[in-house]
């Protein structure tokens, strides 16, 4: 009987030892440092990871209070409070974060977990303390948070529309404010819907096909794509889509840039080039025809003089066109320089009047300038060009003839010059566009009234360069008066 009991005790002891050996082997292979503390919070044992991580030996640490180890680096009031409450209150703690400067490691962030080790029948209680170095993880988390914040700020502040789609379904998962404002949609009205369900695109079938191409190739670009806003307005956009992976999921980013104004400018530029070519070709045809005919034998002197006069008028018009182009080029390249000196405006008006006298026999050019007018501070050549453009327009855009009156007066330190015609007038809507490049009024784009739409833009550039401003007063069927002012000496 005693022999059986002895055998059972021996077997039990052997099993306990095997369990202890197993547990020690498991603990020794764990990468995180593990400590076993007694009820006084003295180190009973630790695994190899602890000794390796903190560059200490068992002889230096075992039997010491945890607050004394590593030169007192673990003497943290909050940690002391947590550990001292574990045994009497049968509690534990997890995820307690310690950020400390360790001599052997530098500034590190440690995550601590502790709990009581249950050992029924034992006189002393033990505490298992696990230490996880989360410094690198915290750094990566902070970098990711900063990166996400930067991306979100860029996403929210971008001056292009941005859509984020689910790469598999085509559903919209995010949209930035700029696109919502551009197209007139609310975020709630877009999120969760497919791109072709919103009504962005005119052709749903083409949009679906483009999405399939994007899924297959990972990239799609449209340089000129028609879209419709929520209220039905048409616009042209540049549409670029890329597929990439975020957090293990495939997404599609669509960048939408409104190029409606750019396309309009390109069309206006192309139209301007066509008009310019037409003007030059017509002018050269008139000059070549007039000079060739004037040299023929048997032509009367009066006829020759009239032909040469036509050639001179065309030459002056072409020269003014070239001058306007040069002024615009100087302004756009930042090389426009004005030489402002005291100027008698009456002299310049007389000179321009003589240049334009033969432009149209059905118009009467009238000067209304007081004899004792103060001098202006201006660039005479540029003022001459402004007057030529405005008076030439007055003649051109009042095809029924009548008077073109040039007047001048002083007001509040400025000399105000006005050019009044008896033409067809300008609507308020057209007046807004008058001083932009290449603009020609819809009502005046006939073959009888030629022009590049460049003169008034150049007038504005030159007036403002001399410290003045230019404006118009007009009404449909009531003629027009163009004003510009220049500072007095």
Image (cartoon, grey):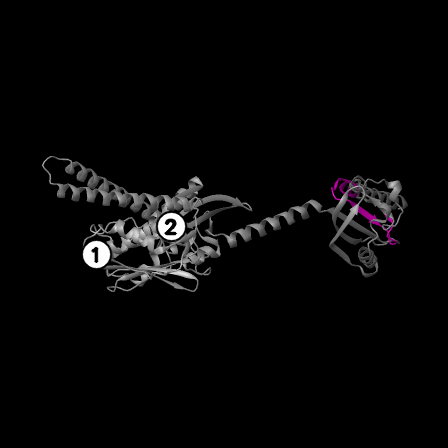
Residue 29: where, in percent of width, then height?
Answer: 75, 40
Is 357 on the left-hand or right-hand side of 68?
Answer: left
Is 169 on the left-hand or right-hand side of 430?
Answer: right
Badge 2 density bin: few <14, some 14–19, many ≥20, Cα 10 Å: many
Q: Which mark is residue 380?
A: 2
The Cα–Cα distance between marks 2 and 1, rounded to whole angstroms, is 25 Å
Residue 276: where, in percent of width, then height?
Answer: 28, 44
Q: On screen, 303 above or below 196?
A: above
Q: Is residue 41 magenta?
A: yes
Label 2: element kind: helix
Q: Which residue is mark 1?
A: 363
Which of the 4 quarters of the picture holds residue 371? Answer: bottom left
Residue 462 visible somewhere in the drawing: yes
Is 358 on the left-hand or right-hand side of 410?
Answer: left
Q: Is residue 367 magenta?
A: no
Badge 1 density bin: few <14, some 14–19, many ≥20, Cα 10 Å: many
Q: Nearer the viewer, mark 2 or mark 1?
A: 2
- The reply to whether callout 2 and callout 1 are in contact (CB within 8 Å) is no
Q: In terms of depth relative to the viewer, which is nearer, 267 or 12?
A: 267
Label 1: element kind: strand
How many marks the image carries: the answer is 2
Residue 200: where, in percent of width, then height?
Answer: 38, 54
Q: In terms of depth relative to the viewer, which is nearer, 16 or 470?
A: 470
The C terminus lies in quadrant? bottom left
Picture residue at 80% right of the left edge, 57% below the top: 78
Q: Give the mark nearest the N terminus, 2 or 1.
A: 1
The residues colored magenta run 22-44
Q: On screen, 419 above or below 287?
A: below
Q: In terms of depth relative to the viewer, which is nearer, 135 or 484?
A: 484
Q: In terms of depth relative to the viewer, which is nearer, 37 or 221?
A: 221
Which of the 4 quarters of the picture holds residue 192? Answer: bottom left
């Amino acid at each position: 009987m005693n022999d059986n009991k002895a055998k059972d005790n021996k077997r039990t002891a052997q099993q306990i030892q095997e369990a202890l050996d197993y547990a020690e082997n498991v603990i020794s292979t764990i990468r995180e440092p593990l400590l076993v503390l007694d009820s006084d919070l003295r180190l009973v044992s630790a695994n190899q990871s602890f000794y390796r991580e903190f560059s200490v030996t068992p002889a230096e640490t075992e039997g010491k209070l945890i607050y004394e180890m590593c030169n007192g680096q673990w003497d943290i009031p909050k940690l002391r409070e947590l550990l001292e409450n574990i045994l009497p209150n049968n509690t534990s703690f997890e995820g307690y974060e310690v950020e400390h400067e360790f001599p052997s490691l530098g500034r590190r962030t440690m995550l601590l977990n502790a709990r009581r080790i249950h050992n029924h029948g034992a006189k002393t209680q033990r505490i298992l303390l696990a230490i996880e170095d989360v410094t690198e993880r915290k750094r990566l988390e902070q970098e990711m948070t900063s990166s996400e914040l930067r991306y979100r700020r860029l996403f929210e502040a971008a001056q292009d529309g941005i859509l984020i789609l689910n790469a598999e379904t085509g559903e919209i998962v995010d949209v930035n404010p700029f696109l919502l404002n551009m197209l007139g949609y609310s975020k709630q009205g877009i999120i969760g819907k497919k791109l072709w369900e919103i009504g962005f695109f005119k052709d749903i079938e083409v949009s679906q096909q483009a999405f399939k191409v994007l899924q297959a190739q990972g990239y799609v670009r449209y340089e000129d794509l028609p879209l419709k806003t929520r209220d039905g307005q048409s616009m042209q956009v540049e549409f670029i889509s890329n597929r990439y992976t975020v957090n293990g999921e495939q997404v599609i980013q669509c960048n939408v840039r409104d190029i409606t104004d750019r396309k309009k400018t390109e069309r206006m530029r192309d139209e301007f080039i066509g008009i310019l070519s037409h003007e030059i070709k017509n002018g050269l045809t008139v000059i070549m025809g007039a000079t060739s005919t004037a040299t023929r034998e048997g032509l009367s002197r009066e006829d020759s003089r009239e032909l040469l006069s036509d050639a001179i008028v065309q030459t002056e018009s072409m020269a003014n066109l070239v001058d306007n182009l040069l002024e615009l080029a100087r302004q756009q390249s930042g090389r426009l320089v004005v030489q402002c000196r005291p100027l008698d405006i009456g002299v310049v008006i007389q000179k321009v009047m003589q240049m334009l006298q033969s432009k149209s026999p059905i118009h009467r050019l009238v000067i209304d300038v007081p004899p004792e007018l103060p001098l202006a501070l201006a660039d005479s050549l540029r003022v001459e060009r402004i007057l030529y453009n405005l008076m030439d327009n007055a003649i051109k855009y009042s095809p029924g003839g009548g008077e073109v009156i040039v007047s001048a007066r002083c007001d509040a330190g400025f000399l105000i010059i006005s050019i009044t015609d008896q033409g067809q007038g300008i609507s308020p809507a057209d007046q807004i566009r008058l001083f932009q490049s290449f603009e020609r009024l819809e009502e005046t784009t006939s073959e009888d009234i030629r022009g590049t739409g460049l003169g008034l833009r150049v007038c504005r550039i030159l007036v403002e360069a001399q410290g003045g401003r230019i404006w118009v007063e007009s009404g449909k069927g009531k003629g027009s008066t163009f004003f510009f002012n220049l500072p007095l000496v």
